[in-house]
Image: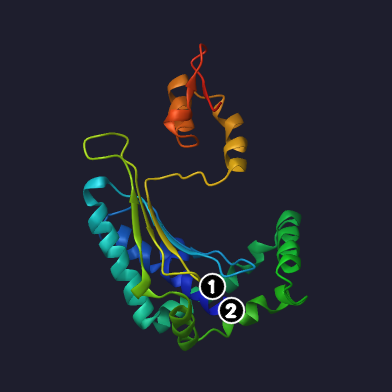
């Protein structure tokens, strides 16, 4: 199902300015500056994510619109025109996936890690071209179940700042959908460590604000030099 999901998601939210989510959520209603969706293929079934940024006072409307767009896509799939445009864009942009030694190495690593066939890159474009409307609808129906969505919202209470609101929607084990609204969530110690050096050049106030993204407030220890670090 990789290629039907890949091409279908380009239509839904992976195609940037030409995606359905972008058109319906940003262009037509102005709910978000950025809105997107993507699958994360893993060795085991991985997540499907949808994200957007919006103001607190319109977060509920924005989320409702995203749900309508995603629900409509799952029910009916892309139109023939949307599918044709997506395939043309992906085929036309394929060379940009292998236009440097770094990108070629990334592709070779992907082939090795997932034990993909040795002709993966040779067959990539033909496989994109072969995707049909029915394949997209069937693949999304198998991997994303709208009846099993769960929403989690994280953010400051009303009247407090900063306004941070994150929504996650998970359809179950084999696919989870996350609506991220004005939030940056650190999910690994590695991400924290690699970010500490980048923070060093910012003002004390900015450093303190950014470090709160990485460690809970009860573990933050102000020092005499006004920096903030984790014990």
The x, y position of residue 124, in whole percent, is 66, 76
Q: Which of 88 and 153 is in front in this view?
A: 153
Q: In this view, does 122 lie to the left or right of 219?
A: right
Q: Please, is residue 129 above or below residue 185 in the view?
A: below
Disc 2 is placed on an element classified as helix
The x, y position of residue 212, in whole percent, is 45, 32
Q: Please, is residue 84 above or below residue 207 in the view?
A: below
Q: Please, is residue 67 above or below residue 224 in the view?
A: below
List the residue tagged with mark 2.
Answer: 128
The x, y position of residue 166, in whole percent, is 36, 50
Image-quadrant location for residue 184: top left
Label 2 Cα neighbours within 10 Å, binned few <14 / some 14-19 / many ≥20: some
| Viewer-nearest of discs 1 and 2 | 1
Residue at 49% across, 69% down: 173
Image-quadrant location for residue 230: top right
Q: Is residue 146 left or right of residue 192?
A: left
Residue at 44% across, 69% down: 172
List the residue tagged with mark 1.
Answer: 6
Q: Are marks 1 and 2 in contact (CB under 8 Å)?
A: yes
Label 1 Cα neighbours within 10 Å, binned few <14 / some 14-19 / many ≥20: many
Q: Quadrant of the C terminus?
A: top right
Residue 194 - label = none
Disc 1 is placed on an element classified as helix
Q: Earlier in the sequence, mark 1 or mark 2?
A: 1
Alpha carbon separation for disc pair 1 and 2: 9 Å
Residue at 59% across, 73% down: 91
């Amino acid at each position: 199902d990789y290629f039907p999901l890949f091409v279908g998601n380009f239509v839904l939210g992976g195609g940037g300015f030409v995606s359905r989510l972008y058109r319906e959520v940003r262009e037509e209603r102005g709910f978000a500056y950025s809105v997107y969706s993507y699958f994360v293929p893993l060795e085991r079934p991985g997540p499907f994510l949808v994200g957007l940024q919006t103001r607190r006072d319109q977060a509920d409307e924005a989320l409702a619109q995203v749900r309508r767009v995603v629900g409509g896509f799952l029910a009916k799939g892309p139109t023939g025109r949307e599918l044709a445009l997506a395939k043309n864009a992906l085929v036309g942009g394929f060379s940009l996936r292998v236009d440097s030694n770094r990108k070629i190495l990334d592709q070779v690593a992907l082939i090795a890690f997932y034990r993909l066939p040795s002709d993966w890159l040779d067959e990539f474009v033909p496989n994109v071209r072969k995707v049909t409307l029915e394949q997209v609808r069937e693949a999304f129906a198998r991997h994303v179940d709208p009846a099993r969505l769960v929403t989690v919202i994280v953010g400051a209470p009303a009247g407090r700042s900063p306004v941070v609101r994150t929504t996650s929607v998970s359809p179950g084990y084999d696919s989870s959908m996350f609506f991220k609204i004005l939030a940056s969530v650190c999910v690994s110690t590695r991400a924290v460590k690699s970010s500490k050096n980048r923070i060093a050049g910012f003002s004390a106030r900015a450093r303190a604000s950014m470090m709160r993204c990485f460690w809970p407030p009860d573990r933050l220890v102000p020092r005499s030099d006004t920096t903030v670090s984790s014990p």
